[in-house]
Amino acid sequence: MKCELCGAEINEDEAKQIQGQKVCEDCYIDLAAKPKTCDPWAVYSAQNLSSSNITVNESQARIMAYLEKNGPTPPEKLAEDMDMSMDDFEREMAPLRHMEKVRAQLQDGRKVICLWQQGQC
């Protein structure tokens, strides 16, 4: 059988059921454990761990460097310029938001991502 989301070949006994679909394990994890940018508990945890020398990964550092150079950017353009799928981009953005490194806001009616310390994007 095939995963109903990505089309990967899977054994029927390995298929997971989620949201009315039979999917592979990777798609199941993506759907079940999708990180949320607006998660007060994650923000609280990140703030309390900030003194423990937490660092960003390479992809997150690239996102921050891009925003520092180019300023506020729509998420779709940022993901495209970073050569990431939107799912991968959102997975990298959630921890940056929790650590208060980046944020989203509306600019001329469009959502943009900017560095946290830039204040008003």
Image (cartoon, grey):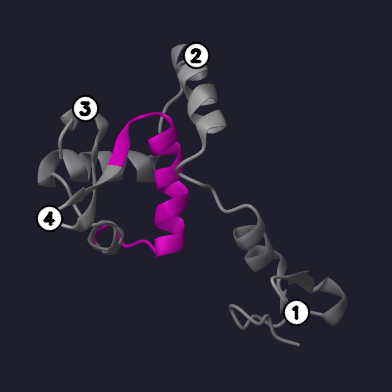
Relative side of 78 to 49, left or right: left
Secondary structure category for the residue under label 1? loop
Mark closest to the chain's N terminus, 2 or 4: 2
Residue that badge 4 annotates: 108
- Rendered image: mark on residue 10: 1
Could you tell me how far apart the alpha carbons at marks 2 and 3 are, in whole angstroms?
20 Å
- Rendered image: mark on residue 117: 3
Mark closest to the chain's N terminus, 4 or 1: 1
Mark 4, residues whose alpha carbon is within 10 Å: few (<14), some, or many (≥20)?
few
Q: Is residue 80 above or below residue 71?
A: below
Task: From the image, state whether disc 4 or disc 1 is nearer to you.
Answer: 4
Question: Which residue is at a point 12% across and 42% down the rendered structure image?
Answer: 69
Residue 98, position as x, y percentages in the image: 44, 33
Residue that protrudes farthest toward the top in the picture: 51
- Rendered image: mark on residue 52: 2
Q: Is residue 111 above or below residue 15?
A: above
Q: Is residue 26 above or below residue 51?
A: below
Secondary structure category for the residue under label 2? helix
The amino acid type of the residue labelled 1 equals: Ile
The magenta segment: 81-103
Could you tell me how far apart the alpha carbons at marks 2 and 4 are, in whole angstroms?
38 Å
Could you tell me how far apart the alpha carbons at marks 3 and 4 are, in whole angstroms?
20 Å
